Amino acid sequence: MKRIMIEPVSRIEGHARITIQLDDAGKVTDTKFQVTQVRGFEKFTEGRPFYEMPGITSRICGICPISHQLAASKACDAIMAVRIPPAAQLLREIIHCAQVVQSHALSFFYLSAPDLLLGMDHDPATRNVAGLIEANPELARAGIELRKFGLLVIEGLAEERVHPSWIVPGGVKSPMTVQARDRFLAAIPQAMATAEKTLGIFKGVLDSFTEEIANFGSAPTMYAGLVDSAGNIQFYDGLLRFRAADGSIVQEGIAAEDYAEFIGEATLSDSYLKAPFYRPQGWPEGIYRVGALARINVAEAMGTPRADAELTEFRQRFGRMAHSSFLYHYARLIEVMYGLEAMQLLLQQADVLDTHVRAEAGVNALEGVGMIEAPRGTLIHHYKVDENGAITWANLIVATGHNNRAIGDGVRQVAEHFIRGDKLEEGMLNRVSALVRAYDPCLSCSTHAIGVPALDISLVDAKGALLDRLRSDA
């Protein structure tokens, strides 16, 4: 009996390990995807004034602080029972599009492109962003420029690139200037050209990954994501829709405040990461996925011309419902194009320069929920407050949590297909890690234990036999 441990899983945000158990014949008998960190933001926000939540929760992550600020601010808007000014909504949507663009660029170029463009079996010493720069400096520069564009918009609106304090309950702190709008609009065409070029390069290498596409977490599941009234993709202000693996709509029109009727959270004994599920089907039958691939499966269309053209080509190649987790990379690039087009349309709106950008109010409701689509999937912030506005309870359901069970199942599928126990090769193990990277998980965002996490310690002998076990289900 052999045990392979991949720790840490590289090129992801946060810390995780993968354990693979082999029998004496070298066949995979078990796998575990274990998130080994815990942050606990939900507990230490208790007692803080609700209006501090956007600033506090943005510190959960340095990659997607904008996403947490938006979800937190929407929850606070609900506590204040206000409708934010039209200009504030436009500005929130613009900065959110910028966040999606820069985050997807980071995922594709910095974390996954070494596998995709250099090869899964490439020398690990240079299978990284430095090796990519050396092998293809023009493409690496394009990745840097695309991420730089997203950060340019964030900084131009919020005056800070990381953890800004511009998004607040009731709207935003300050309006956009004419100069900033014109600067953003002038930069979009080049960003679009970069996105189109990257899509072309990626589509050109897809045929060399047919085995990975077939075996990278390709089991059909349900999918969830926000859509607008026409069923098109919506990052900021849509309603939640669940679609089955066969393409039928399971449930739609779910408002933020009703999420708990449809989403439950399972606690796993060997991971600090909870596992949400579709409550009407129970656990574990109610597994579903979120994120870029889920969004393009759930939505009818993107709603912008270039992104819709790319989505049409995607569906012609992989069908109306695409299930391989490898295709998350493709979906992210389509969403980059959509984010740029949507941002351009938002910047051209007549109200976007209006100076009324914040609604003022106190506590008018003792509970509020904010729900958006973060780059990695549906993000939910749920707060309860006392009459003075102090947080008494908080729950965060983060994108990577939704995907927890699917990632674990995908790890097993990849391990069973690619790993040969009689002759282990680094490229085999890299494919297991690459399955996790396909989801672009943010484990720092997603581990927020409620109460005391369970303790499970196993004592095994040299042959893997269990000698003793200490467990606490607190």
Image: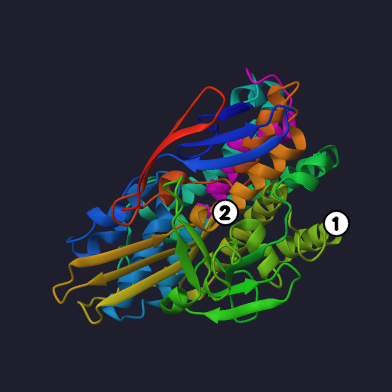
Three-letter residue code for mark 1: Arg
Alpha-carbon neighbours of circle 2 within 10 Å: few (<14), some, or many (≥20)?
many
Q: Position of residue 364 (x, y in %)?
A: 23, 82
> Eyeballing the image, is 173 above or below 247?
above
Q: How many marks?
A: 2
Magenta stretch encompasses residue 249: no
Q: Nearer the viewer, residue 145 or 372?
A: 372
Tell me, yes or no, if residue 108 can be seen here: no
Q: Tell me, for residue 317, which label it has, or none.
A: 1
Image side of residue 302 versus residue 44, left or right = right
Which residue is more in the foreground, 123 or 411? 411
Q: Residue at x 46, y 52 (%)?
A: 268
- Residues marked 1 and 2 touching at CB (< 8 Å): no
- Of label 1 and label 2, which has the lower sequence position? 1
Q: Which residues are magenta?
A: 99-125
Which disc number belongs to residue 405?
2
- The secondary element bearing badge 1 is classed as helix
Residue 469 lies, in percent from the top left, at 41, 39
Identified at 63% across, 65% down, the residue is: 223
Quadrant of the image occupied by residue 256? bottom left
Residue at the front extreme of this rendering? 467
Question: What scheme was used to colour the molecule?
Answer: rainbow
